[in-house]
Image: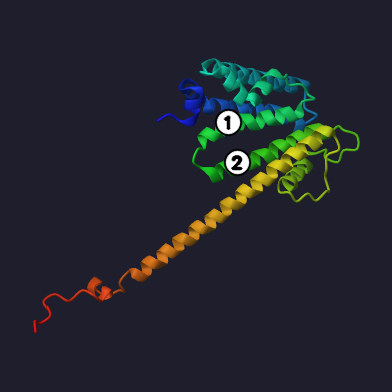
Amino acid sequence: MATPEESEHGERVARWERRLEVPMLLLASAFLVAYAWPVIESDMGHSMETRLQILSWTVWAAFAVDFGIRLWLAENRPLYALRRWYDVVLVLLPMFRTLRLLRMLALIRMLNRSMAGALAGRISLYVAITSALTVFVSAITVLDAEQNAPGANITEFGDALWWAVVTVTTVGYGDYYPVTFEGRLVAVGLMVIGIALVGVLTAAVASWFIRNANLSESADAEAQAAPEPGQTEDEGEGAAPRSGSAPRAE
């Protein structure tokens, strides 16, 4: 039976995406390293920064080629492009330094696409990894936007990570806050995502408690139904007559 993805866009596209799950995950991880390293270590050498920029552009080109192939394989190409509008935007817009927010969306989209297939059926693990990834990428992005801005108070990765954690949990102490327009856009997106993640995590924890409570009740019921040590099964039931003691006929 065809999956919804195969029914909507064709079997060839679905098969291509399944085959490239692991390579895309590796490429997205490489892109994350190439983006995060210069932000965290702003005083790195020029040669290393150039290598990381080349790596970023190479990975970006690989994802552009991947999207072009998926678009070519799709049965209804306009519909596929419309449903994958975020891929179109990420591929067509160049990776300028001013598009930090776009790069955050690109990172989350790249990694999310690969993890969705690799962790299918493992909802809790998927949510945990997605939450950690969102916090980390948001911290990197806001640090990239804020660290050289006048009057900024988020200038180190530790401060950015703390800000991302308290923001995604909707606590918001206010000790660190973005002052740039791009940083505030990241904050808005992170707060919206945080509300959704808190709801999902709350549901997952509640489901875990309910499942354990049901298992405990089932175990107690089985223990009560089981015969005591030294007691035969017939005696435990108290209903079946003993062998050879049939009732007399009056």
At 62% from the left and 18% from the top, the residue drawn is 64
Query: Relative to 111, does residue 70 appear above or below in the rendering?
Result: above
Q: Between residues 2 and 25, which one lies in front from this camera angle? A: 2
Quadrant (top left, top right, bottom left, bottom right) of the C terminus: bottom left
Instruction: Residue 29: tell me if it is visible.
Output: no
Q: Are marks 2 and 1 in contact (CB under 8 Å)?
A: no
Q: Earlier in the sequence, mark 2 or mark 1?
A: 1
Q: In the figure, residue 221 lies in which quadrant? A: bottom left
Residue denoted by label 2:
129
At 72% from the left and 40% from the top, the residue drawn is 190
Query: Label 1: how many residues lie within 10 Å, few (<14), some (14-19) or many (20+)?
Result: some
Quadrant (top left, top right, bottom left, bottom right) of the N terminus: top left
Judge depth for marks 2 and 1 and give the one in front.
1
Q: Between residues 8 and 29, which one lies in front from this camera angle? A: 8
x and y percentages locating residue 176 in the rendered image: 82, 45
Q: Secondary structure at mark 1?
A: helix
Residue positioned most to the front? 250
At 76% from the left and 42% from the top, the residue drawn is 158
x and y percentages locating residue 90 in the rendered image: 68, 23
186 left or right, relative to 149: left
Q: Secondary structure at mark 2?
A: helix
x and y percentages locating residue 20 in the rendered image: 52, 24
250 left or right, relative to 114: left
Query: Relative to 7, does residue 179 appear above or below in the rendering?
Result: below
Residue denoted by label 1:
113
Q: Between residues 152 and 82, which one lies in front from this camera angle? A: 82
Rendered image: mark on residue 151: none
Query: Relative to 44, does residue 72 appear above or below in the rendering?
Result: above
